[in-house]
Image: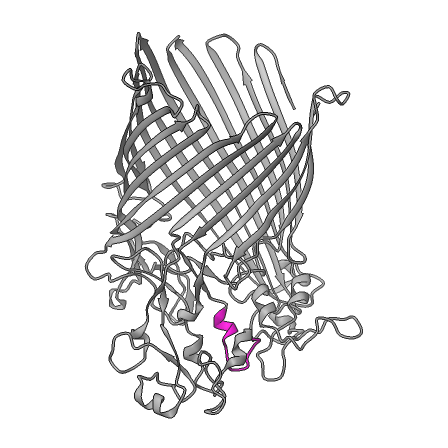
């Protein structure tokens, strides 16, 4: 809804969203409102206020469903011989067969789950623009982000998610409840003075400004255990309760400037400069400078460029700039203190202890310097629009939590380590294939990204963990970040002769899994783990086709990527040959005897010989290539004045995630446990929530 006069203009939007998830008993509701208002008391002053509150309710969307051995994983691990329901309609509580680990009914667990999440958020923006002179403006803005979040979760006598979960019902002493909440306030104040000047063919635009920002959060959590029964699940009904609270904050101050210059609209130059200071760094290193410069040349406006229908527009451009990253959490520049009780004089006495993370007052900004070179070319009277960009980004002083030796008394310290290079090519093409009564346009984009870890400090051979059952990503110098790390599967010891002549693991036997002896020391152990895959795509692309005929429109959006691998972590369970859970279908081809050796790719089930096969290895790594038709939308727009009292109207029907073409064996080739975590879970599928195919019908009506 919008309205306006000469001095006041306003628009408001109210939305309600209610969606059930693909899994049972999951839901999200969102209530949102937005209002934008501008007041112009006189010609030289503009005052604006924009507010956007959102209230959101979630049920079982952030807990229980996906992740390591949560409900989705439990469903695949359940015995296929056990029914969901008993003959009388009640749940078959346990879905284990003889010899399996206890596994409770995932359908029942999903229906009993009751993890509630509530959030209320208000985004606000107020500004005032003063035209001091016709070409001199001062603008001040205050941006606010206020939020509160609450989580409530009860795990009663019938809770039992995970492998080897307790048989149900559990004892009431095992029941637990958790409540957590936080509220935060974030504000950003920006003040800018801008000046623009035009003298004949010269145009100059100058801007200088100062900004300050602060973010604070207060949070608390309360836990209860040992309830009398499931009827009263409030924490006040628990026999044992505990709680904690805390507060954190960070702030940043910035000075900034910008210069835009163009001559005749064809020679373009932009220069910017920022000086940012962050409270997350020590007093001597909290400030850093981030300049940038860019230039453009519209060649097609030159007199020597002959106008023709083949090339109707040509622009060359280049830029260089630096940006900074300060996302390391709060208070890492000092060693923190936490509560720690101790015994003094035979009595329990409250005290304090140093954190296991050593503070580092010299840790400072991570810096990235990027160069871009590109061109824009229009062909055939702008019926074909082509753009190309090459970028080269070098990141130095990367922020990383470095492990320390135990004898130091600390476990880690935040440091600036290493250099990372990212580069690539980006192409985009837009074409008007058919014009007239029937229209057909196509938009195509292609990206060819690359990255490489250039260096690490002495004494740090890699970035990543070195544990047995986790930490499957490792970044090493000279390779792309986040490489998969594990054993190279080399088949099965098919015969006694083969077993006698090959390197062996401590539990190896005839018929067990054989891994490659990477370091050629004659023994298979953890030192033979190596890089076994790359989660970084070599290319990704998108294609959008739009068709219009009279009042009808059809839009088809496609996306794909390739050259990357996915580590299917689910195979840690699906290849467990101890009879502990359900397994993948190909396990039927296991080695049984010398006369029945299977397909040579699946080992035997002999006790105490199976662990090596279910450790991270190259059989977990699959191609991540896929092509998806992400959205198909068909609409019809009614002609104006066709419907009484209605200014305009459009009806439409669409399907999202219509088709996916891939050879990946998991539920979703876009699975990625945590894309931003290159240390532990980048590019890994750990029972990731599937993307649903969604059918929609709707209408847009303006009165």
User: Residue shown at 47%/85% (left/top)?
Assistant: 604
Q: Is residue 163 left or right of residue 336?
A: right
**Rendered residue at 26%/66% (across/down):** 405
Please say whether residue 83 is one of the residues in the magenta stretch.
no
Q: Nearer the viewer, residue 148 or 236?
A: 148
Residue 45 x, y percent position in the rendering = 47, 12
The front one of 389 and 697 is: 389
Quarter assignment of residue 521: bottom left
Residue that sits furthest to the left in the current view: 458
Q: Relative to 153, does residue 658 appear above or below in the rendering? A: above
The secondary structure that dominates the magenta segment is loop
Q: Which residues are magenta?
A: 571-583
Q: Position of residue 319 (x, y in %)?
A: 28, 32
Q: Is 575 part of what is drawn in magenta?
A: yes
Q: Position of residue 342 (x, y in %)?
A: 39, 67
* Quadrant placement of the N terminus: top right
Q: Is residue 215 above or below residue 341?
A: above
Q: How is the image coloured?
A: one colour
Q: Nearer the viewer, residue 303 or 449?
A: 303
Residue 679 seen: yes
Q: Is residue 364 left or right of residue 236?
A: left
Name of the residue lying farthest toward the front: 309
**Depth check: 108 or 539 in front?**
539
| For residue 456, side relative to residue 648 (left or right) | left
Q: Residue at x 30, y 88 (%)?
A: 501
Q: Position of residue 81 (x, y in %)?
A: 66, 77
Is residue 475 toward the left or the right of residue 56 in the image?
A: left
């Amino acid at each position: 809804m919008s309205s306006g006069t000469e001095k006041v203009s306003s628009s408001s939007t109210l939305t309600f969203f209610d969606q059930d998830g693909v899994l049972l008993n999951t839901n999200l509701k969102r209530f949102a409102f937005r209002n934008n208002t501008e007041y112009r008391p006189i010609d030289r002053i503009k005052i604006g206020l924009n507010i956007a509150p959102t209230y959101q309710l979630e049920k079982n969307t952030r807990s229980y469903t996906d992740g390591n051995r949560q409900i989705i994983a439990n469903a695949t691990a359940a015995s296929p011989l056990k029914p969901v329901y008993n003959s009388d309609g009640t749940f078959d509580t346990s879905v284990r067969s003889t010899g399996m680990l206890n596994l409770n009914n995932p359908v029942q667990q999903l229906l009993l789950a009751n993890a509630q999440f509530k959030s209320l958020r208000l985004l606000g923006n107020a500004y005032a623009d003063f035209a001091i002179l016709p070409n001199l403006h001062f603008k001040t803005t205050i941006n606010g982000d206020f939020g509160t979040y609450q989580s409530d979760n009860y795990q009663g006598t019938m809770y039992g998610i995970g492998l080897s979960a307790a048989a149900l019902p559990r004892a009431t002493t095992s029941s637990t409840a958790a409540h957590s909440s936080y509220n935060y306030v974030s504000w950003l104040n920006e003040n800018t003075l801008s000046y623009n000047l035009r003298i004949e063919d010269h145009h100059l635009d100058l801007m200088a400004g100062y900004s300050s920002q602060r973010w604070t959060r207060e949070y608390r959590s309360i836990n209860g255990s040992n309830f009398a029964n499931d009827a009263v699940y409030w924490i006040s009904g628990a026999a044992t309760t505990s709680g904690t609270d805390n507060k954190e904050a960070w702030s940043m101050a910035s000075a900034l400037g910008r210069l835009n210059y163009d001559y005749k609209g064809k020679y373009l130059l932009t220069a910017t400069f920022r000086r940012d200071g962050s409270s997350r760094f020590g007093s001597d290193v909290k400030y850093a400078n981030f300049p940038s410069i860019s230039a453009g040349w519209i060649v097609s406006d030159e007199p020597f460029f002959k106008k023709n229908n083949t090339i109707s527009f040509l622009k060359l451009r280049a830029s260089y700039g630096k940006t900074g990253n300060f996302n390391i959490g709060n208070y890492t520049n000092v060693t923190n203190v936490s509560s720690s009780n101790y015994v003094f004089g035979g009595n329990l006495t409250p005290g304090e202890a140093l954190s296991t993370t050593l503070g580092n007052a010299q840790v400072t900004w991570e810096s990235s310097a990027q160069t871009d070179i590109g061109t824009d070319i229009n062909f055939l009277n702008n019926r074909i629009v082509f753009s190309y960009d090459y970028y080269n980004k070098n990141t130095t002083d990367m922020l990383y939590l470095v492990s320390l030796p135990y004898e130091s008394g600390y476990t880690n310290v935040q440091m600036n380590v290493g250099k990372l290079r990212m580069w690539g090519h980006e192409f985009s093409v837009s074409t008007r294939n058919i014009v007239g009564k029937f229209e057909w346009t196509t938009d195509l984009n292609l990206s060819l990204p690359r990255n490489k870890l250039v260096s690490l400090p002495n004494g740090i051979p890699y970035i990543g963990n070195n544990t047995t059952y986790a930490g499957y990503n490792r970044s090493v110098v000279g390779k792309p970040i986040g490489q998969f790390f594990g054993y190279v599967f080399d088949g099965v010891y098919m015969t006694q002769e083969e077993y006698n002549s090959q390197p062996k693991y401590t539990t190896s036997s005839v018929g067990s899994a054989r891994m490659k002896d990477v370091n050629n020391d004659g023994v298979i152990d953890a030192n033979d783990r190596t890089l076994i895959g790359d989660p970084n795509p070599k290319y990704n692309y998108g294609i959008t086709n739009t068709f219009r005929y009279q009042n009808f429109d059809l839009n088809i959006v496609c996306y794909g990527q390739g050259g990357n691998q996915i580590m299917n972590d689910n195979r840690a369970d699906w290849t467990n040959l101890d009879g502990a859970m359900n397994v993948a279908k190909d396990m039927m081809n296991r080695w049984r005897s010398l006369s029945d050796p299977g397909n040579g790719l699946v080992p035997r089930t002999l006790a105490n010989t199976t662990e090596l096969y279910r450790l991270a290895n190259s059989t977990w790594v699959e191609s991540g290539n896929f092509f998806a038709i992400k959205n198909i939308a068909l609409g019809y727009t009614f002609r104006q004045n066709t419907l009484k009292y209605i200014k305009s109207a459009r009806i439409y029907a669409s399907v999202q995630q219509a088709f996916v073409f891939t050879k990946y064996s998991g539920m979703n080739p876009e699975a990625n446990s945590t894309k931003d975590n290159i240390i532990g879970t980048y590019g890994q599928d750990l029972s990731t929530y599937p993307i649903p195919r969604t059918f929609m019908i709707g209408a847009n009506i303006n009165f």
